[in-house]
Image (cartoon, rainbow, N blue to C red):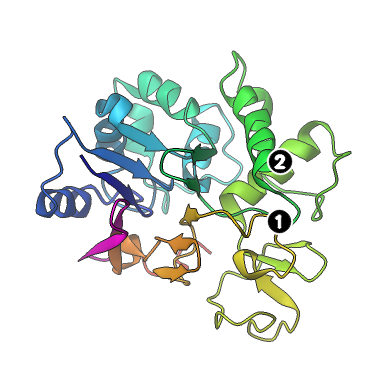
Amino acid sequence: MATYIVGDVQGCYQPLRQLLDKLAFNPAKDKLWSVGDLVNRGPESLQVLRFFKSLGAQAKVVLGNHDLHLLAVYYGNRNRYKPDKDTIEPILKAKDSDSLMDWLRHQPLLYHSKKQQLLMVHAGLPPQWDLNLAKSCAAEVEKVLQSKHPESFLLDLYGVSEKVWKPQLRGLTRLKFITSCLTRLRYCDSDGKLVMKNKMSPDIKPGTVDSDAHIYPWFLHPKRASRNLTIVFGHWATLGLYTGKNLYALDSGCVWGGQLSILRWEDRKIFQLGCPQSRAPFAEK
């Protein structure tokens, strides 16, 4: 039995199945985990959702920003819906759309496995959060998403007014800050403030990112309270496949014509497959 962890799929169903076939993935005994962004930009998001849902308990998914975007659109928030760029319309029109969306909103934002000794998140953690705080914060948003009225949050999903973690944050401001960290974070400044606009790749050297002299990839922040955790994440295609001390970044730009990456956890071996380009880098801008 093996545990496979896949990077951002984003609707690239055929490359996913091809790579799993090469690995002789057997859903009867193997597990397939995802760092999120199952959908959008690629051509077969509906098939990806159906496949992961069909795996039942053998699958573990954490929600990414594109997954939340899909849920927001489904519940009526079209503020950032771009029909010419988003590829989620087949999901919204599918006969099993309601069932798929109910399954998706019940997936966690963060998953910690004591057995595997790892934490899986789509984007990252702000430097102030240790494991317990990260788990409790994620649970707050999950509770709303899994409630009878998730639209109370999803209809006001976008934008974050607070950029620094404060325990006294309340209401939607708190939920949106937590969600931004777990699904969109890349950089923080030296004070732990979220830097959301910079999407480019760092040099993987603390304090040096383009013209910004004092911002850090979240996982290299010198005051990171989660530095003793082993973390697997995605989201950052310009960073690409990256492994460091206790770190595995698995978004290698599949939808951009890069590669789909899968980490076999038991021996930490990484497998990749080249993908056809479905979207040019930064085409969503």
Depth check, front residue: 179 or 192 = 192
Task: Please report the bounds of the magenta region as a residue range.
Answer: 262-277
Q: Quadrant of residue 267?
A: bottom left
Pinpoint residue 13: horizontal percent, then vertical percent.
23, 47
Q: Is residue 26 left or right of residue 192?
A: left
When the figure is inspected, residue 178 is found, relative to residue 248, above or below; the finding is: above
Please give the residue where the numbered disc 1 appears in the rendered image. 225
Q: How many marks?
A: 2
Mark 1, Cα crowd under 10 Å, few <14 / some 14-19 / many 20+, is some
User: At 73% from the left edge and 45% from the top edge, which residue is drawn?
Assistant: 177
> Which element type, helix, strand or loop, lies under badge 1?
loop
Residue 116 percent location from the top left of the image: 41, 43
Per the image, label 2 sits on a secondary structure element best described as helix
Q: Which mark identifies residue 133? A: 2
Q: Is residue 207 above or below residue 192?
A: below
Magenta span contains residue 275: yes
Q: Where 145 falls versus 163 (above or below)? A: above
The residue lying toward the viewer, choosing from 226 and 185, is 226
Mark yes or no: residue 86 visible: yes
